[in-house]
Image (tube, rainbow, N blue to C red):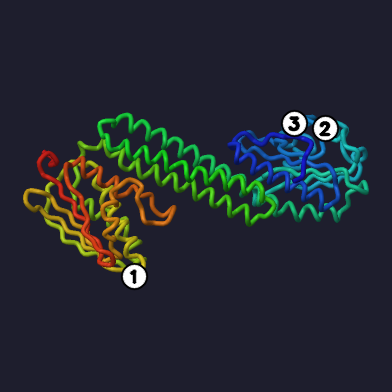
Amino acid sequence: MVKYKTPFKPNKTMDNSHSLIWEKFLTLSLEHCLKEVKAHRGSIFIFDEEKKELILEIAKNFKNNSFKNIRKTLGEGIVGKVALLRKPLLVKDVDKEIPFQDRPFFFNYHSKSFLSLPLEYSENLVGVLNLTEKEDGVFDDQDLNTVLEICKNLGIAMYALKNYLKKQKEDKERLLKEIENLKKVIDHSQKFSSLGKLVGGFIHEINNPLDGIIRYINLSLDCLEEESIVKEYLFEAKQGLNRIARFIRSLLDFCWSLSSSQNSIDINRALEESLFLFNYYFHRYRIEVKKFFSPLPKVLDRGLRVVFNNIIKNACDAMKESGGELFISTQIEGGRIKIVFKDTGCGIPEEIKEKIFEPFFTTKKIGEGSGLGLAISYEIIQRYQGKIFVESEKNQGATFVIELPLEGNRLQ
């Protein structure tokens, strides 16, 4: 790995892992440009869109800290003028071609010739690349054209990576905020003791994808020279974050419903709304839905929509390979509301039927299911003092039955 003399700190808007990726990318990009024109010194300024200034982010072969944290406004000095005009600059002799007031930045160079080129994406200014100290002393038009071609692609890559890392940071902050909100909801809902089991399992489970993210980021740092590998590892890291977010949302679906017990819900209408959400899957997986709804009284809303969505989603997953039928019925039977979901999918083997309502139990591949859907559904039905159970055999489909007592759940 190439060692550089100047330990410049990347922009603080990114967290440490993202900053390392960004710094390594800039370092390798600068090294490549210097190698192409046989030069020994160079730097890259990055344009800060919010502050409208250029910040020196990476440099090679400068005296330690001599140019640390240099900032230039648009139009200020050579770098600022190149950025403002968006035109590359080839200087063969600083003394003859550059005004005296603009020379201080070049006093420490051993060469009087340099290249300064804007880095752009579409109409967006990304930064400025500077190269000097060419082996044979003077840059020529061929050197300018060589670096210009590199900068066309480099500007695009830098813009894409910068925005990608920025979005990753925002996703991470949003995730942390959701976790904090979850903690507040849990503190407010201590009376539901079974939630503690879910949260404990959640905390244990969240460590796994986080560990994967760290591992992928470390691997990407080692392999950053290969663009395709970088994209692959960063994509995997993103998948890990998405998986965490899905776990958080699953728990929040349940926890936020704790505060909604004074609202009413029309069960048949709620089922129609849930079915509407899954129309895409019905068409894609060739699933025919058959409804048999009876008139029902409104009940208190304690999260039934979450239950319906989880069961319908599982039914879709069970029939996605060969299609099938989903039967949904509602009725009042023996003084209780009865809701039945019956699919013609792959069914549930006898040996795991007793485990499906346990937190984090899933037969799906990693990343495809959280193992929380049915566990959350079970907790919600318990709050109605109701029952939820499944009747199924392998390859014979599955029937989920929900029974809700009218007493204490009807809206008066």
Q: Given the current orientation, which residue lies at the most extreme left position?
A: 334
Gap in Å between the C-alphas at discs 3 and 2? 10 Å
Q: Are marks 3 and 1 in contact (CB under 8 Å)?
A: no
* Image location of residue 348, percent across then percent down: 28, 60
At 40% across and 45% down in the image, what residue appears? 247
Q: How packed is label 1: few (under 14 Cα within 10 Å), some, or many (20 or more)?
A: few
Which quarter of the picture shows residue 289? bottom left
- Callout 1: helix, strand or loop? loop
Vertical side of 351 occupied by 92: above or below: above
Quadrant housing the C terminus: top left
Gap in Å between the C-alphas at discs 3 and 1? 63 Å
At 81% across and 55% down in the image, what residue appears? 145
Disc 3 marks a residue whose amino acid type is Lys
* Image location of residue 59, percent across then percent down: 77, 39
Residue 63: mark in rendering: 2
Left or right: residue 251 compared with residue 258: right
Which residue carries the number 3 mark? Answer: 68
Gap in Å between the C-alphas at discs 2 and 1? 68 Å
67 and 17: which one is in front? 17
Left or right: residue 94 compared with residue 6: right
Left or right: residue 163 compared with residue 386: right
Disc 2 marks a residue whose amino acid type is Lys
Left or right: residue 141 compared with residue 248: right
Q: Given the current orientation, which residue lies at the most extreme front position?
A: 351
Q: Earlier in the sequence, mark 3 or mark 2?
A: 2
Which quarter of the picture shows residue 132? top right
- Callout 3: helix, strand or loop? loop
At 41% across and 38% down in the image, what residue appears? 203
Residue 322: mark in rendering: 1
- The mark lying in front, picked from 3 and 1, is 1
In this figure, what is the number of numbered marks? 3
Q: Are marks 3 and 2 in contact (CB under 8 Å)?
A: no
